[in-house]
Amino acid sequence: MPSDANTAPANAAATRHTFEFTGTAGEMWPIVLKNLLLNIITLSFYRFWGRTNVRRYLWSNVRFMGDPLEYTGRGGELFVGFLIVTVVVFLPLVGLLTWAQALMARGEPFGFILFSAGYLLLLWLAPLGLYRAFKYRMSRTRWRGVRGAQTESGVRYATEFFFYTILTVFTAGLLLPFMEAKLYTQETNNRRFGTGRFSFSGSSGPLYSAFLISYALVVGGYVLVFVIAGNLAKLGFVAILGLYLFLGLAFAIYELAKLKHFWNSTKFEGAEFVFNGEIGELIKLYLGNILLTLVTLGIAYPIAQMRVVRFMTEHLVLVGQINLAAVTQSTEAEPGFGEGLAEGFDMGTI
Amino acid sequence: MRLNARYFDGSNLEGQTVDLDLSPSLAVIRPVAGRGVLPAIPSSKLFEIHRSADGNRVDLGVADNHDIHLMVEGAGVAAYIDTALPALGVEAAAQKRHASVRLLAIAGGVLAVLVIAFLQLERLVPVLVPLESERALGERLMEGFVESSDAVCTNQVGRAALTRMVNRLSPEGTLPIPLTVWVTKSDWVNAFAMPGGQIVIFDGLIQKAQSPDEVAGVLAHEMGHVEHRHALRRLVRAAGIGFLASMVSGGVVGDVSQQLLVMTFSREMEEEADTAALKTLASAGIASDGFAAFFERLAAEDNESDPESLLAGSTLESLLATHPLSKERANKIRSQPPLQSISPALDETAWQALKGICSPQQAKMDDS
């Protein structure tokens, strides 16, 4: 009884739950360099274990309500995932595409149909891989001993992704916010921490003003380049780099709107997330990461990821009361291996 | 020393406050609230999730039970834990290392099986790909080649001589696929076999040859490639190895290893083609001396000239680059038993005609 009386007012006062990041580049560099060395020695086979080292460091330095996350994934699990997907998915697919090409070389129209079907299948498999990677990462993320989960198999997600992508292409990209909001809804509503649920109540509507500004800047930028220079090939390397930088920054407007709207409409068990980053900070993050990655030829990519994690922990707050005693261990099955499909599409990046 | 800690066992996010008693062998955990007893944890299973920079906080996990988290807080706890548990972290790391070695062994095994399976894939070519398909593929490929090259030689007397040589080496029905032999105007001293019975000889080779037997030897060798369907098998193998290499390395060493493996394996095929060539020459009654002499002469010239030229040239540039002449290979060709009745591959008139296959002619006639 006395403990109950104590916790109630304490919870009521502490309704702003903050995240904190305690990692430093100084601690990350030795991990990055060790991974680099072992990758070279093992013809990059070490990458599964290297990625796990990076994640373990990142996770353990994220604190929520003062307590750290734990990453419980293993390099071997990623490796087994890679092997399984290689044998079950990618080898047959390569065989199919090769056969299709052989048929096309003989001038058989069936070859073209087969080839197109193979590529459409890839468009479906890529988001499936992404979703499977969500599942793996959530299941390997612990906080206070409780693990996360991503429910559903990802088939529905991949199918929606597939059709929305086609729609988006046919509408010159204008359906992008609609597509992203739909997919984010599904991602979020299927996300759990223990038995606690995440939920998203937003829509694509609030994204459109920012999206149209970004879209107009990008289209305008291209038109300008074509009017002034005739075509891209005539521009020098620096000018092209400048153009891509401009396009990237133009899209930062939309990216920021997305971060704000998506997080501000996301709840965990009655508490609401609040994202308070601003455009200048986001651009600074992007520019720093681009520079960091370019200058080190990609070696410092984990450092760039760490900057993203730090940025998120600094700008994200969970506001409201959570009944911590009521959130119990997840009952979702844990996948035994991870991310092979995402790896194949070069998406297992974090 | 008793430590203040918060204990979580994964049953909920609230956890409980506990007293933690650490010894090198056991971590004894007593709830502060005094209700019940929590299971003790062998200290060897404890590992450090994280410690704060100021040393006033250490978060502990349990190696085989990720449900349990112990958050230890207090001035100087990190230093105390390091004294109480000198092996902290090492045990868990050792377990992981053990698992990694086992996994690497499994991985190595699986990879070896995959590589072997891929290298055997080409052997399925004769079973899986019908000859008509290979023929059609070869024709398609040559269509592009003939269109892009206005240097296909068509001198009709020369072509007639060539046809005579081809027919002598390969009488009707001795090869599974009908042959199409092209000569193109080029200084390259080389010849190659494409899928589907398509053989291309560069005029440079014919000019370099000192007797029709030398050309016949090379032609018989390329026919050996056709007989064993090497061109198609090489395509399949190159695709397989390229895919495997890029999967394994993430694209880093793909190209290099692919090139190396394709090269080494083509030697095996060269031997097969040599064997077939010697048989073909024997049944056609043509001495194999010309075949050997041609390669030996090329090798001798190559040694006199800049040794870098072999490396600098593309694989197509030199016959020796794609058909390396080893001692065994030369010996094998040289050690053929003498044939009972031999005659030159072409008589002198036809040989001169073949030499002029790329020279212009007045009247064009279709003689293929």
Image (cartoon, rainbow, N blue to C red):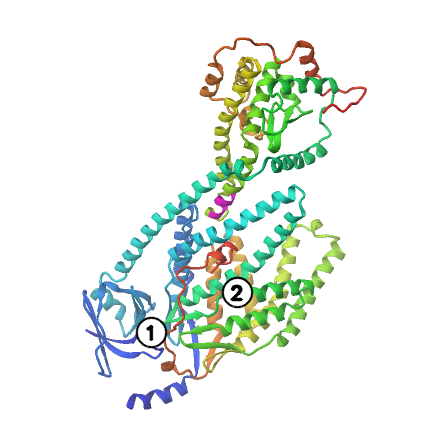
The image position of residue A221, as x and y in percent, is 70, 61
Q: Along the horizontal axis of the image, is A195 left or right of B93?
A: right
Quick check: B168 above or below A58?
above
**Residue that mark 2 sits on:** A155
User: What chain does badge 1 belong to?
Assistant: B
Asked whether the residues under marks 1 and 2 belong to the same chain, the reply is no
**Residue found at the very far front of the displayed protein:** B173
> In the drawing, what numbered circle is on residue B326?
none
**Numbered range of the magenta stretch:** B242-247
Looking at the rendering, in which quadrant would you find the N terminus of chain B?
bottom left
For discs 1 and 2, the disc positioned in front in the rendered view: 2
Image label count:
2
Q: Specify the label residue B10 is tagged with.
A: 1
Q: Position of residue B357 (x, y in %)?
A: 71, 19
Residue beneath the point at 22% across and 62% down: B86
Q: Amino acid at mark 2?
A: Val
Residue depicted at x 50% and y 74%: A189
How far apart marks 1 and 2 lie (CA) works out to 30 Å
SS for callout 1? loop
